[in-house]
């Protein structure tokens, strides 16, 4: 049966358009053909590139109280080019040694690039590291040819890059899409939506929007892509809707909280604590919800996970002894494998014990799956006829969050703005790897496609996408640029959602973003929809 989670929309004011010169362009989609073009004096622009770049803004109202604005800014820079990154190293000494090796191998035009300072909340100061880079090409194919020559000489970890995405000065261009909704005028709802109405599997945002007749939508949180990292489609962080916790938090990582009880959105550092209690008094920590035991994507879990219980982005931690709760929203059956499962009915009574994992999930009630020590706990304390109660506690910024039917939570990170100030807690939220500073360089300092959510001072909510990885169309944004964009649009609090190839926005029947994946629009795990 199809599950529809609906929540009263949060108060949003109509978008405040910056004063820029707007010109007509050839429509690319039916949505753009309907845009109401406006012209104003140029005295405020997006903080991307230098202030004197040309900027065009077009806007339309896809529904009462909803404003969609497309912003085209800047132009391709004659100073940007394709090149090959040979390696990212921590010290200048390492870079000089590599440079010498390249010259010995006949590569004379290599150079060293000092990277920007570390993340704002990094205790260690100084540069992230040094890049050894070679070549300067107008065509990507020529850079790829150089990369192949280096590979033939035994060099590995090579990357073909476009310098306009470095995070340094450029003229762009950029394509930014902005959605804003006014609760006082919009009669609809903001709905967090799971792909295919289940945890398992993925679906494009376009498909989600189509089957829900959405007015507009944007992609949402991080998720598991492939089986080696867990259950494909599993939310790699918290997801809650309609009063139900579907996925546990990456503890101490920021999330977007939508609640009509508080009558405004909130961004908070969220953690979850889940416990199973048997009628014999035994208590066991529940490690996770609706996912494959033993694999914790983005880490931040509990119970002795290795290599860390702290958040670590795009990394899968492991735990050979886990207790996982499955509900019907996961799908028809649990993940198969070694271990023990118990089926608990709607009254909390154990009605079935399985000596393996992988079985039917009841439509009411749940399944507890255990591996290692957790399997032994189930055999000892979840015997036929006994009762098991599972309770969840959610905290945001250290305060207890009441989960009711109007509360929704969507994972993301890092936080970008807090109380009107730029506050990027990338290290705290696991976007910096101590053993590989190059990870933060690629993820946070380089420009990538971005999906962002922000809250204005009066509680209004913004959804923003920035296209990227498309030289000549849009170069994307780094974390700091994303924060500045959200602040310029009026947000006082903002968060980074899943980006890269996942970045997508729809308005009506049209996708208004350009996919950065070569295969086209990426199937994702969840989205945020505006529905009637």
Image: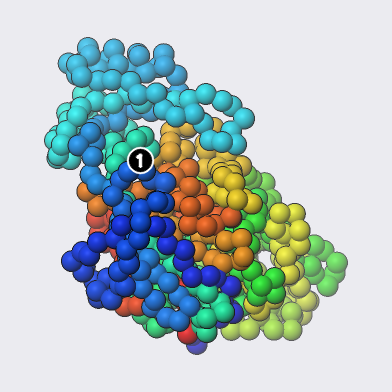
Instruction: Give x and y (percent) for residue 524.
Output: 41, 64
Q: Residue at x 28, y 14 (%)?
A: 101
Check the image and report above or below for 36 versus 466.
below
Q: Is residue 3 left or right of residue 130?
A: right
Q: Nearer the viewer, residue 451 or 44?
A: 44
Direction from residue 304 to residue 292 in the image, left or right:
left
- Residue 160 figure quarter: top left
The image shows residue 350 at horizontal and vertical percentages of: 72, 78
Relative depth, front residue between 510 and 366 = 510
| Image spot of residue 505 (x, y percent) | 38, 66
Instruction: List x then y, in percent, for residue 239.
Output: 57, 66
Q: Secondary structure under badge 1? A: loop
Occupied quadrant, residue 346: bottom right
- Residue 373 visible somewhere in the drawing: no
As drawn, the residue found furthest toward the right would be 281
Q: Residue at x 35, y 53 (%)?
A: 42
**Can residue 48 be seen?**
yes
Q: To which residue does mark 1 refer?
A: 50
Residue in the picture at 74% in, 79% down: 348
């Amino acid at each position: 049966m199809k599950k529809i989670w609906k929540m009263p929309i949060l108060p949003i004011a109509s978008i405040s358009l910056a004063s820029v010169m707007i010109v007509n362009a050839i429509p690319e989609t039916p949505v753009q053909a309907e845009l109401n073009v406006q012209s104003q004096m140029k005295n405020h622009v997006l903080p991307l590139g230098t202030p004197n770049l040309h900027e065009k803004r077009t806007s339309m109202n896809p529904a009462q109280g909803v404003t969609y604005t497309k912003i085209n800014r800047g132009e391709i820079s004659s100073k940007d080019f394709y090149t090959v990154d040979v390696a990212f190293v921590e010290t200048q000494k390492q870079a000089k040694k590599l440079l010498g090796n390249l010259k010995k191998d006949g590569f004379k035009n290599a150079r060293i690039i000092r990277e920007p300072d570390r993340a704002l909340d990094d205790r260690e100061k100084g540069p992230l590291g040094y890049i050894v880079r070679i070549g300067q090409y107008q065509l990507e194919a020529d850079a790829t040819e150089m990369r192949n020559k280096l590979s033939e000489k035994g060099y590995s970890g090579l990357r073909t890059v476009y310098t306009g995405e470095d995070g340094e000065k450029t003229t762009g261009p950029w394509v930014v899409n902005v959605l804003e909704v006014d609760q006082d005028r919009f009669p609809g709802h903001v709905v967090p939506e799971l792909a295919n109405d289940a945890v398992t599997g993925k679906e494009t945002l376009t498909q989600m929007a189509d089957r829900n007749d959405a007015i507009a939508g944007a992609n949402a949180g991080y998720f598991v892509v492939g089986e080696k990292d867990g259950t494909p489609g599993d939310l790699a962080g918290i997801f809650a809707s309609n009063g139900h916790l579907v996925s546990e938090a990456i503890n101490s990582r920021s999330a977007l909280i939508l609640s009509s009880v508080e009558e405004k959105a909130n961004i908070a550092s969220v953690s979850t604590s889940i416990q199973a209690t048997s009628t014999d008094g035994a208590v066991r920590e529940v490690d996770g919800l609706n996912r494959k035991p033993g694999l914790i994507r983005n880490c931040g879990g509990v119970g002795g996970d290795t290599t860390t219980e702290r958040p670590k982005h795009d990394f899968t931690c492991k735990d050979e002894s886990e207790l996982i709760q499955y509900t019907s929203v996961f799908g028809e059956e649990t993940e198969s494998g070694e271990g023990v499962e118990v089926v608990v009915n709607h009254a909390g009574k154990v009605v079935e014990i399985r000596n393996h994992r992988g079985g039917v999930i009841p439509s009411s009630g749940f399944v507890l799956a255990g591996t290692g020590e957790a399997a032994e706990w189930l055999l000892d304390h979840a015997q036929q006829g006994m009762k098991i109660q599972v309770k969840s506690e959610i905290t945001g910024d250290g305060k207890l969050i009441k989960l009711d039917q109007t509360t929704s939570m969507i994972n993301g990170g890092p936080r970008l703005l807090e109380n009107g100030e730029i506050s990027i807690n990338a290290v705290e939220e696991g976007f910096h790897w101590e053993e590989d500073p190059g990870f933060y360089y690629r993820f946070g300092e380089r420009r990538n496609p971005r999906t962002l959510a922000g809250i204005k001072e009066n509680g209004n909510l913004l959804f923003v996408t920035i296209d990227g990885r498309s030289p000549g169309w849009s170069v994307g944004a780094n974390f700091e640029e994303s924060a500045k964009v959200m602040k310029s649009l009026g947000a006082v609090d903002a968060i980074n959602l899943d980006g890269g190839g996942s970045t997508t926005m729809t308005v009506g029947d049209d996708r208004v973003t350009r996919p950065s994946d070569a295969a086209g629009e990426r199937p994702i795990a969840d989205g945020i929809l505006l529905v009637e």
